[in-house]
Amino acid sequence: MSEYIPRIADDQVQDSLKRNPVTALLGPRQCGKSTLVKNLTRSRDDVIYLDLERPSDLQKLDDAEWFLQSQSDKLVCLDEIQRKQDLFPVIRSIVDSDRKAGRFLILGSASRDLIRQSSESLAGRISYKKLTPFLWAEVEGKVTLEEYLNRGGFPLSLLAPQDNDAYEWRIDFISTFLERDLLQFAGFTTVTMSRLWQMLAHNNGQTLNLSKIGESLGVSHTTVRHYVDLLEGTFMVTQLRPWSGNAKKRVVKTPKVYICDTGLTAALLQLRSFDQLAGHPVFGSLWEAAVLAQIRAWFPDAGLSFYRSSHGHEIDILITHHEKIISIECKASLSPALNASFYKAAEDVKPGHVLVAAPVDHGYPMKKGIDVVSLSELPEKVRSLL
């Protein structure tokens, strides 16, 4: 067995198991959920693990109520729970008869919005935790920043022996996701979804023009919205909503959409190496997506948005928490600078502090209230300001 790389979600899941009857660990396929759970439970002999994509494990649940009730002295781990949503009422009934902590640990590669029955059936009984592909803080020192940006954070891509192996894994992942994993959700065609995903990669980090995309794909804007929501619900894209704190200004009201993983963006654009990636027009927005992914994972309870006025004045990312506002500017440069458009936007938003996230080794103060930070320093710097 290869060495386990600790995740920031380890302690969150452990703590939830001590407090809640049901813990859900959600995140994209192949991001390491099963590995995390098996590592956390490896020293326990009171755990039963069922993979709901395995026919032999599914068969054990033919009489789910009897089987799960018979495991009342164990922690029952159910992987890929979205494939058998009729388990939720059964789990609820079992939990209500004995609400002790640590009864069930369910893993899923669909969001709460897609697994609707869980929120309806298990409200007040379940705690949700999220696992992302590797964060930079989890792998710093094991890979270079260039490898991290090019290969992304999915373990089997990031830790592959060679760039080409990593690229081929991501191509296979994309194909499998489109041709198999999405089949459990209705209302889409594989060809159209594939074309949309590629369009989103080319326009990574841009505002979403549903009508224009729909015209290009030959479908309605409502269909495009459904497809994007489905990609977001399966953790393949992230939507960043516009900030609406200044009612006096006319602002853009359309969300920006990012591919969830920089390595998937590179693969969708057929970019095999960091050199190809760094020379591509999407590189700046890809760095922005990497920064956003770190912030979303480290600060899940903070409000995240962007600001763009009708005049085009823009702030990449805004973090709002307890009436504090932090501005994050993402600059894929070793010598970052802020332009007049940013300062105009800052006059509108009035953030308490500005951080310029850049691929530097060490941050430094740029001017009063503005600091350049590395990707390594970003989480702690944000924490100190909230």
Image: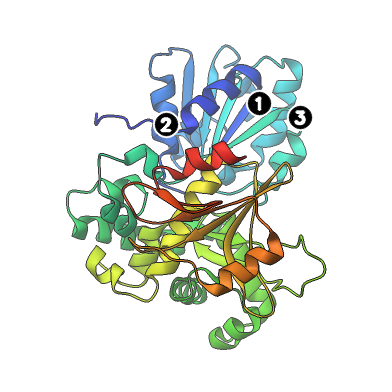
Q: How far, Cα to Cα, is label 2 from label 1?
A: 27 Å
In screen coordinates, is 348 left or right of 144?
right
Note whether residue 108 is visible: no
The outermost residue toward the left is 162
Q: Which residue is mark 3?
A: 124
Q: Secondary structure at mark 1?
A: helix
Contact check, label 2 and label 1, Cβ < 8 Å: no
The outermost residue toward the right is 248
Q: Which residue is mark 2?
A: 36
Q: Earlier in the sequence, mark 3 or mark 2?
A: 2
Q: Secondary structure at mark 2?
A: helix
Contact check, label 3 and label 2, Cβ < 8 Å: no
| Residue 224: % across, % down | 62, 74
Residue situated in front as seen by the camera: 4 or 249: 249
In screen coordinates, is 386 left or right of 55?
right
**Position above or below: 189 against 156:** below
Residue situated in front as seen by the camera: 44 or 348: 348
Which quarter of the picture shows residue 104?
top right
Give the label on residue 65, or none: 1
Q: Earlier in the sequence, mark 1 or mark 3?
A: 1
In screen coordinates, is 317 left or right of 204?
right
Q: Amino acid at mark 1?
A: Glu
Going 63% across and 71% down the picture, which residue do you hit? Answer: 344
